[in-house]
Each structure stands twice: as C-alpha cells, then as structure tokens.
Image: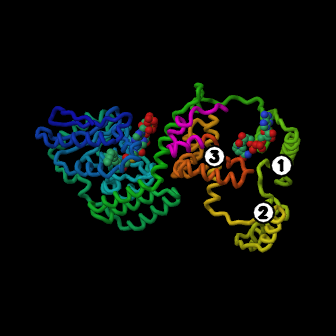
Amino acid sequence: AEYLRLPHSLALIRLRNPPVNALSLAVVNGIREGLQKAMSDHTIKAIVVCGANDKFCAGADISSFSRSSPGISFGVVVDEIQRYEKPVVAAIRGVALGGGLELALGCHYRIAHAEARVGLPEVALGILPGARGTQLLPRLIGVPMSLDLITSGRPVGADEALKLGILDVVINSDPVEEAVKFSQEILDKPLEPRRLLNKSVPSLPNMDSIFSEAFAKVQKQYPGFLAPETSIQALQAAVNLPYKLGIKEEEKLALYLQKSGQARALQYVFFAESSVHKQSPPSVASWQTASPQPISSVGVLGLGTMGRGIAMCFAKAGIPVVAVESDPKQLEIAKKAVTSMLEREASKMQQSGRAWTKPTLTFSSSADMLCESGRFGQKTGKGWYQYDKPLGRVHRPDPWLSEFLSQYRETHHLESRSISQEEILERCLYSLINEGFRILGEGIAASPEQIDIIYLSGYGWPRYRGGPMFYAATVGLPVVLEKLQKYYTQNPDVPQLEPSDYLKKLAAHGNPPPKDWQSLAGPPGSKL
Ligand SMILES: CCCCCCCCCCCCC[C@H](O)CC(=O)SCCNC(=O)CCNC(=O)[C@H](O)C(C)(C)COP(=O)(O)OP(=O)(O)OC[C@H]1O[C@@H](n2cnc3c(N)ncnc32)[C@H](O)[C@@H]1OP(=O)(O)O
Ligand SMILES: NC(=O)c1ccc[n+]([C@@H]2O[C@H](COP(=O)([O-])OP(=O)(O)OC[C@H]3O[C@@H](n4cnc5c(N)ncnc54)[C@H](O)[C@@H]3O)[C@@H](O)[C@H]2O)c1
C-alpha cells in the first residue's frame, strides 16, 4: 500500500497489489503503517483509502491461504480503523469483495462508483467473512439481508448496496476525488455513530424463526457445504453476544472452516476454473465466437452403444448419415438395432424387445436373470426385494433371492464375501481416477484441472471435494497407487484397475500437488 499526503490536510492510502489488490501480509502491513503515520501526524485531519488500477480490493490473497489463517490478524486492523479519532473514508471503484469489503466496513464512510460491486463471497471458497464481516454487516444492514448476502456470497451492484445501506454515496465520477471533497465536509461530524462495532444488531421479534428458516434454506440449497451453515452460526453470535465475544466466535468458526478440507478443495476450484477459462485451443476458434455451421450430412465412426444412438438422432432429424463400423459382427448387430429402433419410432410403440449386445466388460448376469424371470423391481412387486404390491414402495428381503444367489454362486464357482463401503468407494473412484491419469499421460486432457472442472460441471461431483484428480491428491497418490495395485492383483481381469504409468511416475515423487504434475511427469503423449 502507498501513503500519500494530499492538500487540505488529507492523507491517501492506496492498496497496490496487481491484478486485484488482494490482501497479502505486505498489503496489510502497508495499510497499518499508513494509518499509523496519518494518526501520528497532527496536520492530517482525515484519511481516504482506495485501490490502485481502478479496483478497491478483491479480499484476501487466496493463493496464500494454505500458508496462513486469513482474517484473524486483519480483523484487528478493521477494529483499529473504526476506533481511530480521524475520519477514514473508503473510495471504492471496481470491486470491494471479502476482506476488501470488511476493510471498507471498518472505515467510517463508504463512497463508490456506480459500476462498483461489493460483497462477501467467502462461502464460495469454503470459508466465512472472518475479518469481522459476520459481525459488522448485520449491525449495518440487519440480519435478513446479511443472511442473504453472506450465505449466498452474491455480490451486489453499487445501487443495490446504497439502498441496503452498505454504501453512503454512489457517484458516476472518480470516487477518490469525491471522497476527498466529502472528507472535508464531514470533518466536524462525530465519529461515534459511524463505528459499527459499538452499535447493536437491529432486533426483530421473530429472530429465532428467521435463523431456523435460514438453516433449512441453505441445507436444501447447498447440501453438504459447511460454509453457509457455519456463517449462519456466526451471524447468530452477532445477535446473541456482545461484539467482543461475537468476534471470538467468528474467529473460532472461521478456523474450523479453514481446517475443514472443503476450504482447500473450493480454493483449488477457484484457481482451476480460472486456469481452464484461460486455456484456449491452438487455433483461433473459440466457443465464444464460433457460430453453428449448416450440417448437410454426418459421418459416424463406430456403431457401438453411442454410435447407434447418435446415428439414430441424426436420422430422426432428417440428416443423411454415413456410418462406418470395422467389426462385421458389430455391424450386423448395429444394423438390426438401428432398424428396430427406427421401426419402433415409426410405429410409436412403447419400448419393448430391445436389442441387446453383450458388453466387452466382465459383468454379472444376475441382474439380467432376475429380469428374465419377470422380476422387474417395484414395477412387478418383486426384483432384488419383495414389495408390498406391484408399484408398492415398501420392500423386504426375499428368501427366493438367497436361494437364487446360492445357486448362481455354485454355478459360477464364486465364494461369497462381504464387501466394505470403503472397498466399493475405492474400486469405483480409484479406477475413475486411474483413467484420468491415463488420459493425462496420453495428452488427451490438457491438465488435471480440466478433468476436475468437467467432473464438477457435468457429472455432479461435489464442488467441495474439488474433483477426482484433486481428490486423488487429498488421499495421496502413493495410497491410490497402492490400493489400485492391490485391487488389480485381486482382479487381473479388470483392466481399469491396472495402475497407469503416469500415476506411477507421479507417485514416485511422493504426493505432489496437481499444479506440479505436468512438470514432474514430463511431456504427455499426443493421442489427440
Ligand atoms: C499470519 C497473518 C498472515 C496475514 C496475511 C494477510 C492476509 C490478509 C487477510 C485478510 C483477511 C480477509 C478475510 C476475508 O474474510 C477472506 C477473504 O477475503 S477471501 C477472498 C474473497 N474474495 C473473493 O472471493 C474474490 C475472488 N475473485 C473474484 O471474484 C474475481 O477474480 C474478481 C475479483 C471479481 C475479478 O474478476 P475478473 O475481472 O473476471 O478477473 P479474474 O477472475 O480472471 O481474476 C484476475 C486475476 O486475479 C486473481 N485473483 C482474483 N481474486 C483474487 C484473490 N482474492 N486472491 C488472489 N488472486 C485473486 C485471479 O486468480 C486472476 O489471476 P491470474 O489467473 O490472472 O493469475
Ligand atoms: N457408452 C456411453 O455411455 C458413453 C458416454 C459418453 C462417451 N462415450 C464414449 O463414446 C465412445 C464410444 O462409446 P461406445 O459406448 O459406443 O463404445 P462401444 O465399445 O460400444 O463401441 C465402439 C465401436 O467402435 C467400433 N470401432 C472401433 N474402432 C473403429 C474404427 N477404427 N473404425 C470403425 N469402427 C470402429 C468398435 O468395433 C465398436 O463397435 C467411447 O469413446 C466412449 O468413451 C460413451
């Protein structure tokens, strides 16, 4: 941060940490030093705080979170500012987010440009506004709106922030110039009414039900996420405790979240999304600029499960399809399947007599056998279970099944054993992760972040677990490798369990973070 003396007995503190003036230790120390200078200089009557390069501040430096506990020391600075005897005015351009808004809440006045955005987006990073945000915002704008803004993390534009009472003045000109003028006008005004820490949270008669509704809402809206619920607890502390104790509770809850594992995952996702957005194909083509081309005919390579469906889709849309299948047997099966699908479509008959091709994977035919003996589950009142009636939902174990399974085992020389939840999870996830390493090694995926973002965006992988490749690093690559080796030895007929070379190479380095994988594993193949 820079310190400047301005005319009219004013000082300016300008945060400078490109690109978004994030709060690093150096920036925080700079703010503190600037304030101390201004306080000890008797010629200075008021201080303006702003950010360089048209941005106030995007909050704590997220990349430093793994090295320190954010918030704790900065909250002290926010309190110090409030207690100062000289007015401190925040001049906001661009964004004041997270710790940036907490800094502004510590100031006695907030002036912003009409295009500025302010907010407390910490929940998206798995944490809470831990530098007094959960204690000061409700004192300023009340509990219901604080709940909304903090649990959703949604930033608001300057006009909305003005209406809510977060901002004091919104202008279309330079907020620093405006703050300089404004500072001179308020020099004689008492500061005590501007100190949020000495105010109480506006009380409402139905506070208990407001909080219980908020808990129910976030449990439904963000299932599994810890930060929204924990933020509500911090807001409850603001209502129920004096400021001094409320900030202790905020600190305790912030530390709990910071150590939860969800915070690390969500912070990884923040940078992963940013890096994936930046990666562009080698050509100038981009999904943002591309426009659809007319399609006159379509070629489909391979008439397996997907190819057949794809060929059907185009045929149904009236687009000529040329399909190529290298395996004559598959071709025969596919021809029949496509013809029968088209016939079914044409006669608008309900789905029946579906052509079945045996997958190449090893699988148990027990489910087929159940269906073949008329056991279609709830539909027919029996399947794996017995139901109270056809279409009924009450199920109980079926003695018939035990008999069926013991015969099945005998026929296939299988020994029964119980399979733990852990084994199910590991075999499913580690084989998926193994495939991720394979496609990284082949150069089909450009980075682990790309695989993770695809899983978060398209396959419902919980965001707070960071994606499969991040999850692998959380478990530890040597552990994943060892488990895959064990399961592959036990099941040599399941090729998905054979550890990929890429994983082996990386695990030889211990458990490096995903961002280092590519440099450690060497250049990928080029299957693309
Ligand atoms: C022992 C004591 C140690 C004390 C250390 C001092 C720590 C100070 C503690 C402060 C305490 C604060 C506590 C607070 O409650 C916690 C927080 O503030 S958490 C952070 C909250 N802020 C955010 O979540 C903002 C995230 N950023 C954004 O939403 C957007 O980036 C943006 C700011 C709206 C800008 O969007 P765009 O214009 O689209 O640009 P990009 O998104 O591409 O970003 C550009 C560039 O900046 C990097 N970046 C953005 N924000 C941060 C950030 N907060 N920290 C670090 N880096 C950030 C982003 O990754 C891009 O980088 P690039 O890819 O270009 O390298
Ligand atoms: N099945 C799914 O649910 C699904 C979902 C998403 C993506 N995919 C992907 O789509 C692709 C196809 O999947 P699928 O399930 O249809 O596989 P599949 O194994 O059922 O079919 C692939 C077909 O391609 C044929 N083939 C192989 N090499 C060929 C060549 N050189 N020329 C012509 N034909 C060739 C094979 O003989 C086979 O019939 C795979 O890459 C798969 O990962 C599948």
Residue identified by numbered label 2: 414
Give how far apart the Cα atoms at labels 1 and 2 are: 25 Å
Q: Closer to the observer: label 1 or label 3?
A: 3
Question: Which kind of residue does numbered mark 3 sit on?
Answer: Asn
Taking 458 as reference, is 400 above or below it? below
Residue 66, numbered circle: none
Q: Closer to the observer: label 2 or label 3?
A: 2
Residue identified by numbered label 1: 357
Q: Per the image, is 505 magenta?
A: yes
Of label 1 and label 2, which has the lower sequence position? 1
Residue 126: percent from left, percent from top: 45, 52
Taking 498 as reference, is 384 above or below it? below
Highlighted range, magenta: 504-528
Please report the residue visible at 69 percent of the width from the left and 47 percent of the height from the top: 496
Residue 434, numbered circle: 3
Q: Per the image, is 120 magenta?
A: no
How many neighbours does mark 2 have within 10 angstroms: few (below 14), some (14-19), or many (20 or more)?
few
Residue 312 visible within the image:
no
Residue 132: percent from left, percent from top: 31, 53
Residue 207 in which image quadrant? bottom left
Please report the residue visible at 65 percent of the width from the left and 49 percent of the height from the top: 431
Residue 509 or 447: which is nearer the viewer?
509
Q: Quadrant of the N terminus?
A: top left
Do the numbered discs 2 and 3 sit on residues whose CB atoms are within 8 Å? no
User: Disc 1, ligand 2: is the CB inside 8 Å?
Assistant: yes
